[in-house]
Image: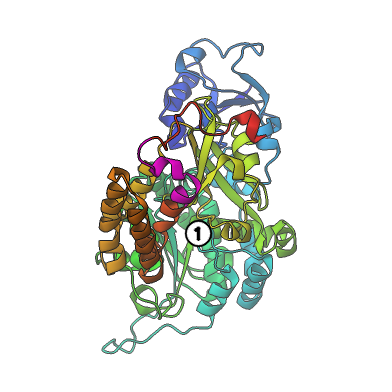
Amino acid sequence: MSIWFVPRDAAARSVGADQIAEALEAQGLEVVRTGSRGLLWLEPLVERADSRDGVRVGWGNVRASDVTACLPEESDESYLGEVEQLDYLACQDRWIYQRVGVIDPVDPADFIAHGGLSGLRRALDMSPDAVVDEVFESGLRGRGGAGFPTGIKWRTVAQQNPAVHAGDPADAPRHKYICVNADEGDSGTFADRMLMEGDPFCLLEGMAIAAHAVGADLGIVYLRSEYPAAIAVLTEAIIKARELGWLGQGILGSDCNFDVTIRVGAGSYVCGEETAMLESLEGRRGMVRAKPPLPAIEGLFGTPTVINNVLTIASVPSILARGAEAYAALGEERSRGTQVFQLAGNIARGGIVEVAFGISARELVLELGQGTRSGRPLRAVQIGGPLGAYLPADALNIPMAYESLAAAGAMLGHGGLVVFDDTVDMAEQARFAMEFCVEESCGKCTPCRIGAVRGVEVIDDLLASDDPAASERLLRDLCDVMTQGSLCAMGGLTPQPVLSALDQFPEDFRVGGGVQSPATRGVSHEQAN
């Protein structure tokens, strides 16, 4: 008897996946709820196989009415054939997402059957220092945007002794923490959510490995309240992991004692910054701390703390299972391993793509993403979230890696790419960047708090002026002050989208006859190729 696989990912559920599962179950069919494969333009993507590990064939954009009797015949346009052979999936090299869309995310047996715990078992057989060395040698860097070497951060925490605070009783517990920042707030990013909904045990396994490596005993996942499905799935996974001895006292029979809890944030964008997250976790308003001290030395409640984002920690189990050398062989320069790219905005085939660093933005947007959803010429791609630079359509040959993007005045960020066609007003996008900073600034430093307000005003003056040169000079000067003087990346990076829009699309800022019409500007799919 065939087994049917229907995603329980929030994106698939939003377009009717639950109703499809119910329709299949009503016919007495066995249904396994999985995460999403990441081909979001095909959701709900329904698959069928003769067994859990059998070859799966699929149908895209299925509706509940399609399965009241049976799915369409294989000649139907919704039939996709063997799912793993689809071009979008076949080109990927999945280290983080190897099980997402394949397994039932809260079935421990399914997790183990597909390689789960292999990394943790190997790590527990190694000394903590050897685990840190393995992560360092892999070249893994933080996937939250800053790109700091993970092994160096872990080694720093491992070398610390938990602080003893004045007034504490002599027998007060001393902790080290593993804090995972899952406050995924960048526009066009959803990889953290999909991982937590599709393979939560992977995240817990990575946290346990980190705990063994640095001597931590407590872990916290800081998860935004806008992700109720992720909260529910991760909560269920934590309960089952405790029951099975994957968390708690003596993990897998070792001397590693480590437990994980979830803390739900209220949705402040600035809490994506590590010290603002710590302030929130300690019960205060999420405001950025001055550094030093670094969180690795004095972090949560003044104790040594590893802070990594979801994709960083989720990379660790595969690195330990397959070896640092295999991971380091992927990528280019100091951008090693794989990155989960997220394709969003006005794009024909949106979703996630996990490949080695070095793939070009052109390949991601025009080949895998198939250009704009509207069919109009591509004009710009914003990389790295709302604080990322805009690249024009004729500059997409740039490799997606930390060094090459930095050299081009851009940044990788969390790996999100947001696509715009030729109807976009880039002056409005620049204004939005300043408005976003006004709304989301924690208010601690003047360049960010006041600079963004003035930035909106100056852009308005520039667009209303018959002689915008003076306003442009003032805007550039203001951006320089924000870049150089802001306490964190909120204010420091807000000028990046503003200046890139101004530099790459100056015609949108000119008054009078300087602005091109949507029909004449931009680069077509054919021209870009």
Type of secondary structure dominating the magenta stretch: helix
| Quarter of the figure that contains the N terminus | top right
Residue extending farthest front: 467
How far across and how far down the image is residue 309, in percent?
48, 59
**Image quadrant in which you'd find residue 221:** bottom left
Q: Is residue 402 above or below residue 78?
A: below
Residue nearest the viewer, comparing 70 with 398? 398
Magenta residues span 500-512
* Foreground of the two, 15 or 343: 343
Magenta span has 176?
no
Residue at image position (44%, 31%) is: 423
- Where residue 271 sits, quadrant-wise, is bottom left
Q: Position of residue 210 (x, y in %)?
A: 54, 67
The residue lying at 33 percent from left, 68 percent from top is 288
Is 324 rendered above or below residue 461?
Answer: below
Q: Which residue in the structure is indicated by mark 1?
A: 145
Residue 216 in picture, x, y percent from top left: 48, 73
In the image, residue 508 lies in the stretch drawn in magenta? yes
- The residue shown at (42%, 48%) is 236
